[in-house]
Amino acid sequence: MGYAYMSCLILDDDIKITEWLSNCLFNMAKQNNDSLNIYSANDPLEAINIFKTIKKIDILVIDYHFKAGMNGEEFLNLINKKFDCLRSIIMISGRPSSEIMPVVVKQLNNQDHRIKFFQKPLIDKIEQIYFSIKEPFMKHENTGYIDFELIIDDRGFLFSKSIEGERDSNTMIKIPEELELTLELIKEGKTSESMLEKFGKLLYNTLFHRKVEVHFNSTEAVARSKKRPIRLRLTITSDEFAILPWEFLYREEGDNYLGTNPDTVLSRYLNVPMPQKPIKQNDEPLRMLIIISNPKDQHPLEPKQWEDTIFKSISQTIADGKIKTKTVEHATYDNITQALLDFTPDIVQFVGHGAYFNHKGHLALVNKDTSGTWLIDDVRFADIFLGHHSRLGLVCLATCESATSDSPKGFLGVAPKLVQRGISAVVAMQYPISISSAEIFLENFYKAIAARKPVDWAVQHGRNSISINVGRHKRDFAIPVLYMRAKDGNIF
C-alpha cells in the first residue's frame, strides 16, 4: 500500500494496557515499513499537553471509561473544541458495549470504532482499522505539499517539524544587530538588490542554522523524490521575531527568495483552536465584495482608480464567469453590513488607510454622519464579519500597515485578529504599496484563486509576479503577507 507517516496517541489509565497497545502498534507499523510516532498518556492533562506539542494526531486510541479526571466523552468534547488535528478515533472498553454511550467524533473514514477490550479480538480489530485509516490517509498524503513547520516559541527557541521528524536548536536564537539596522532602511523604502539579498541571507541564517537546516534539506530531498513541493509554515509566538519581515528570506542555494517561490510556499500559520470547515465546495463563481474606504479627512485614495485597478486585475476571471463582484464605495458600518447580508461574499477585498499604534491595528472607515474618519481597532473591525462566515474564506487588505503586529500570539493586528475570528486566510500589507505593484499582485493572485489554487500558492505567485515585473531592488515583492489557519491552503 505504500509508506505512511502517522502519529498515534493512546490514552488509558491502565499503564499495562498502554504499554501493550504501544508495542502492538509499533510492531504493526514496523512490519509495514510505516513511520508511526506513538505517544501515550495516563490522564487527560498529560494528553492535552501532547496535543499542544504535537498538533497533529492521526489516531487516538482512548479508553472510554477511564476515570482520571473526566470520562472519554468529556475528553473528546474538550479536544474537538480546542484542537483541529485529530483524524480518527478508536474507542476501547472492558465493559459491555451497551454501556458505551453514543458520542459524535471526527472520523477520517466516517466510521465509528468502538471495541470491547480483549487482547486478540482487539488487536485484530485495531489492525483492520489501521489499514482502513491508512488507505485514505495515503491518498491524502501523497498529493500536494509536504509540510515543514518552523516554530519560534515565547522564549525565542527554534523548533522544526516535518515528515522527517522533529528538531530543536537547543539555543535561544538572536536577532543580529545588522538586521535591525537594515530594517529601518527597508521601512523607508531605501533599498537595493544587493542590500535586500544580504538582508534575506541574514534572516535565513537566523532561522535555518545547524540541525534545522539539515532537517530542512532532508525534508526537501524527500519532497523531490516524491515530486512534491514544500509548504513552509512559520508559527511564531515570540513578539520580537513576529515583527520581522520573513517574506524576505533569501536562500543562496537556488538564488531565490522563499516568499516568491511557488514550489516552496511560505505563510505565517496561526494555530487557532476551532474546527476548520470547508468554505466552498461547488463550481459556481466566487463572490468578491470590494470595500473602498476613503474618509474625506484622510489622504485621498482615489477610489475610482483603486476600483479600476481591482477590476482590471480580475477582468479576465469576471469574463470567464469565475468571479462576481459588488462594491461598497462609501464604507460606513451600515453600508458594509448591508452588503454582507445582501451579497454573502466568499472574498472581501478591502482598500483603505491602516495604522498600528498602542499594540493594535486600526482601520479608517467612514463616519456616516460626517463622512470623516471613523477609526476602529482590529477587534471591532473583525467583529463586523461575525455571523458572515458561512462562505467567507479570504480577506485581502490593501492598506499601509494591516499586516503589522508585534504579537500574533495575542492576535494584535488586523490580519491576525480576522484569523482568530474564523477567517481561513488573510492577506495584508506590511509596508505601503503602490497602485502599480498592487495591480500586479492582485491580478496574478486572483487569477490563481479563481483557478482554485491553494491560497498560499496564489500569494507566492503574486509576490513572484511583482519580483519579475518591478524588480528585486525594491521591497514591493515582500510587502504582501499571508496569515493562515487553513493547514493545506485549499479554501475554495
Image: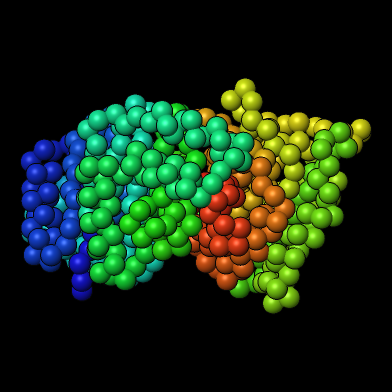
The answer to which image quadrant residue 74 occupies is top left
Residue 125 pos. (x, y %)? 17, 62
Please name the residue shown 56% across and 35% down the image: 185
Taking the image as shown, residue 431 lies to the left or right of residue 231, namely: right
With respect to residue 167, does 361 lie above or below? above
Front in this rendered view, residue 123 or 175: 175
The answer to which image quadrant residue 320 occupies is bottom right
Please name the residue shown 86% across and 46% down the image: 330
Please name the residue shown 25% across and 69% down the image: 225
How many numbered callouts?
0
Is residue 184 at least partly visible in the picture? yes
Taking the image as shown, residue 439 lies to the left or right of residue 18, namely: right
Q: Quadrant of the C terminus?
A: bottom right
Taking the image as shown, residue 89 lies to the left or right of residue 255, namely: left
Residue 223 pos. (x, y %)? 29, 64
Farthest residue in the bottom direction?
Answer: 320
The answer to which image quadrant residue 176 occupies is top left
Is residue 108 at least partly visible in the picture? no
Please name the residue shown 52% across and 30% down the image: 406
